[in-house]
Image: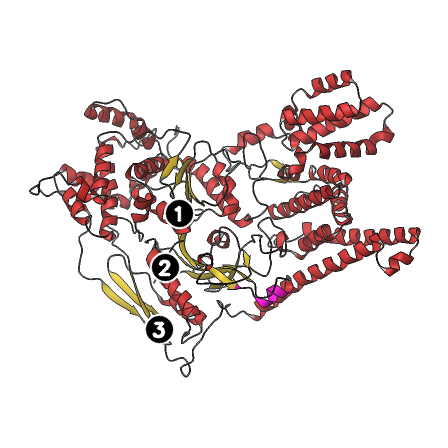
Amino acid sequence: MARIFEYFVVCGIGTEIRTLDANRGYHGAGVMYMPALLDQYPPSNHTLYPPPPPQLPTCVLPAGVEFYGSGFDSNDPSTLPRSYPIVLTEGDGSKIYVSCIAFRDPVCEDIAEAYRIPVNSYADKCICIVSRSPSFQILRDALEEIFVLCFSSSGSSKPLWDVIAYSVSNVPLPTPGKDRVLFAIENSLLSVEVPPKEGLPHADISFQPLLQCLDVDNVIQLFTAVLLERRILLRSNMYSLLTLVSEAICHLIYPFRWQHVYIPLLFFSGVDYIDAPTPYMMGLHSGVDTYGLTMDGVVIVDLEHNRITTTEDIPPIPEPEYSTLRGDIMKLLYPNVVGIDQMKSTRANVSDQFQRGGNRPWGEEHDIQIRFTFLKFFASILGGYRNFIENTATQVFNSQAFLKKRSRSTNQPPDSMISQFLDSQGFLDYLERGLGSEENNNNLLDKLQDAIGRGQNPLSVLPSLKAEPEIITISDPGVGISGSGAKYCYDRFPANVRTEEQEEKRKQILATASGALEYSGRHTTSSLSVLAGNDSKAESLSPRERAAERERMVLDIKVKLQGLWVRLVNLGQTDDPLSSFEYGTILALIESDAEGIGGSGFVECIREHIHSGLNCQLSEEQFIAVKELLKTTINLAMSRNDMATVRDALEVSAEMYKKDINNVSDYVQRHLRSLSIWEELRFWEGYFDCLLDRYSSKSTNYATLVTTQLIVLATHMAGLGLHDTDAWYMIETIAGKNNIGYKHIIKLRGYLSHVRHMFVGYWGIHSVKLQSASTLGLPSPRAQDASDDAQQPAEASGIGRSWVQSMFSRDTSIRAKSFGRVGNWSSDSGTLGM
């Protein structure tokens, strides 16, 4: 028998700490860190069903993990636990439902010691229940009972993970419309049941939050935007609200389904996906800055202020359906106002039933009524649609004939909104599911149209209430009899019991982290003392001995880097370079070296690797690690005014590549564009001086040398995305300061023409990028100019980003796959109800 709970999962700060920008180690309390999966039940070696999705930690803690100096404080609202649901979409379109509670929990002592985290620190932790059933309320209730039990002063009669294991392993999924399952968590009795399949799809949420946040006109506008498959971005400062509104609007379009990217709660570092060109429905916390994103055509729904904005018009629902839909919603929400002029003897009808229900506090009956209101809208607007289903070799539905028939009946020209809806993927998917499918036998839309046509009560299409469901009781025989009345109390959420292998691996990771910090500290001290001559030994050295000591140290660092580099690029497919000892140690050598030996030595390792004949093609994970190391190297080199290292880093980065999702060479240098130094004139002046120093001995004509190196500068500027005007201003300024003469400047201007044109020559793939972007998934990331993913915090959510990209890839291919037989298809708060 299927179980209602698939997993219990704990996410938070793991043994391998790194920031959202992929910087390894602890960098202070004001920085956000990558969450990790800490514990789970069933364990990872079970085979009952697929493992939790790898993006789960990133999604349940969308802002990342933060460290704090204190824990829960009843007088400080910011420290209170938060309970919220999220929904994840798998590659095949199926959904995973997760109930979450996020709270502050003490940092494990061994982690704090290994990473030099202040004692008595706290960090964000999130416990979750994962299910394939949209039973939001029971998921939340069960999770909250476990959370309260953990921190109860009276404790539990069994170890907490035993309570979790029994609940996850023994609570079955009720048979729809037949069973009610009763089970207990310690002394709290819980129940769950699922409505019959013949009715509206199971939606264990309240539709009230949607109707409280948006007025009737905005609800209808959002509904229309979803039907027409626009790009929709919901904004709120409450995680729960984003998920509940997203789920509610998806249920209101029944019997149609949202076919595109669906992320009710987007992790903060994925904000750049808002500029994706394909339809999506995403929710983003109000506190996340979207400055710099174009957002053209995005329908922005501000749930805090009842506001919808977009740069593109959303065609309105035509009459008479609009007035009917709006009126029915008003009768449900404001029955006393709508019916104020009606006589008491008014004949009872469906609207009266809605009116009577509206006098009571919002409940399940209201949810059914609002859903049925929108189903009636579809029955009206698609009246007679079955007569136009053809399913021929050339088309499945005759849209033109249907629109002409509707125009004759309404005496109005064909409507834009209906025309766009008939062309939508949701409508096509609905037709495909109905053709030759058993689902057609349980089509409430068709049943409703038939009932209205026969003059029957529309509500008769919903299944009638049958006898009381059968009660299935799940009892835990171990509750209350464990030992001799023993009680288990906790001051933090406990870790699950680890195997010897897991414990050993944990110790190795922490020992590596601690060792890297110690090595970094020793190296920094040695570097500063020897090179600055501040210790007694250095003071006694002669200049020659001091130079020899420095050479020895440089050679030692380069040898270490060479070995680390070779191991980094040879890691196995199952290894994560960003979590590896090699990456962490290289980063420590680069960051801790005041003289820049680590950074310049790392660049030299890459250069030697390339010149040895290897093409330096990297895996996705290696590529991310290398570009982050290069970013760090360039930033630190700029802070020391070390232009030679910056120059060398740019040159080797242009020779390193991997293949992106469009099978295009994607150079490391493209991913360096986020650095602000490229916009500074002083940088290019220093860079130009480096070029002159390198080639001055090879040229006898100074003007020719300057012109040649200015062209090199211009190609780098184009490749790094500088605007033509800015690039030419800096080139002209540098040319003037080097006195090459007005005639040479004119020649240079003529040769360069438009600096932007050099972009194609620099990358050599501009047209390929444009051609492939539409067929092979989400471009990387803006196809029109191949600009970089600099907005993407490096690997900040590598797994999360891969998950989102897989959805966009699925979205671009879904239309091609659908109707393949048709030859030429043209077209946070706990107060919110569940």
Q: Which residues are magenta?
A: 106-113
Specify few, some or many for label 3: CA neighbours under 10 Å numbering under 14, 14-19, or 20 or more.
Answer: some
**Residue 139's disc number:** 2
What's the amino acid at mark 2?
Leu
Q: Position of residue 95 (x, y in %)?
A: 39, 50
Disc 3, SS: loop
Which residue is at 49% across, 48% downward? 267
**Which marked residue is nearer to the observer: mark 3 or mark 2?**
2
**In the image, is residue 215 above or below residue 767?**
below
- Residues 54 and 331: in front is 331
**Which marked residue is nearer to the observer: mark 1 or mark 2?**
1
Q: Position of residue 135 (x, y in %)?
A: 33, 56
Comes first in the chain, label 3 or label 1: 1
Q: How far apart are the alpha carbons under marks 3 and 2?
A: 18 Å
Which residue is at 80% across, 54% downward? 527
Q: Which residue is mark 1?
A: 242
Quadrant in which the N terminus is drawn: bottom left
Q: Which residue is mark 3?
A: 476
